[in-house]
Amino acid sequence: MVKVLLWGSLRQAADGLTEVEVDAGTFKALLDRLAEAYPGLEPQIRRGVSLSLNGVIYREAWFTEIPPDAEVVLMPYMTGG
C-alpha cells in the first residue's frame, strides 16, 4: 500500500480526505485505483494531475515505479512559465 497525500482541490473530490492509501506500484496504477475508489477524482485525473514522488514532480510518467515507503503527493496539473 502506498500513502498518497492529496493536494488542493483533489481533497474535495475525495470526500475531504487529505491522505489515502492505494495498492499500486506505478503512477498509472495509482491513478486507476484512485479513480475507482474515489469517483469524484476521475474528472480531475482525466484533465491531468502531477505526482510528486520523494520530492520530484512527474507528469504523465505512467510506468514510473512507486516504492511502498515513498513520499507521494498528488496535485492538480501545474502549469507555469
Image (cartoon, rainbow, N blue to C red):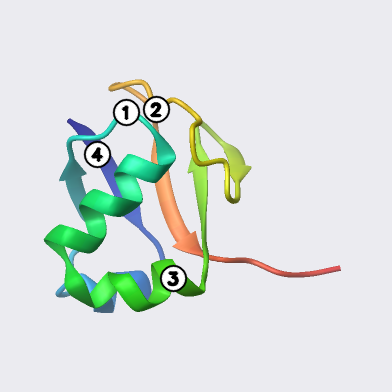
Q: CA distance from mark 2 to mark 3?
A: 20 Å
The answer to whether one can see residue 36 in this image is yes
Q: Earlier in the sequence, mark 1 or mark 2?
A: 1
Vertical placement of 80 versus 58: above or below? below
Q: CA distance from mark 4 to mark 1?
A: 12 Å
Quadrant of the drawing holding the N terminus: top left
The residue indicated by pointer 2 is 66
Q: Secondary structure at mark 4?
A: strand
Structural distance between the alpha carbons of marks 1 and 2: 5 Å
Mark 1 and mark 3: Cα distance apart in space:
20 Å
Looking at the image, is mark 4 or mark 1 nearer the viewer? 1
Tags 1 and 2 touching, CB below 8 Å: yes
Cα–Cα span, label 4 and label 2: 10 Å
State which tag comes first along the sequence, 4 or 1. Answer: 4
Q: Report crowding for label 3: few under 14, some 14 to 19, many 20 or more residues within 10 A (C-alpha).
A: few
Residue 45: x and y, percent?
41, 66
Label placed on residue 46: 3
Q: What residue is shown at x 29% (from left), y 71% (from top)?
A: 41
Q: CA distance from mark 4 to mark 3?
A: 21 Å
Q: Which residue is disc 1 drawn over?
A: 25
Question: Mark 2 falls on what kind of element?
Answer: loop
Residue 57 percent location from the top left of the image: 61, 44
Q: Left or right: 79 with respect to 49?
A: right
- Which residue was labeled with disc 4? 3
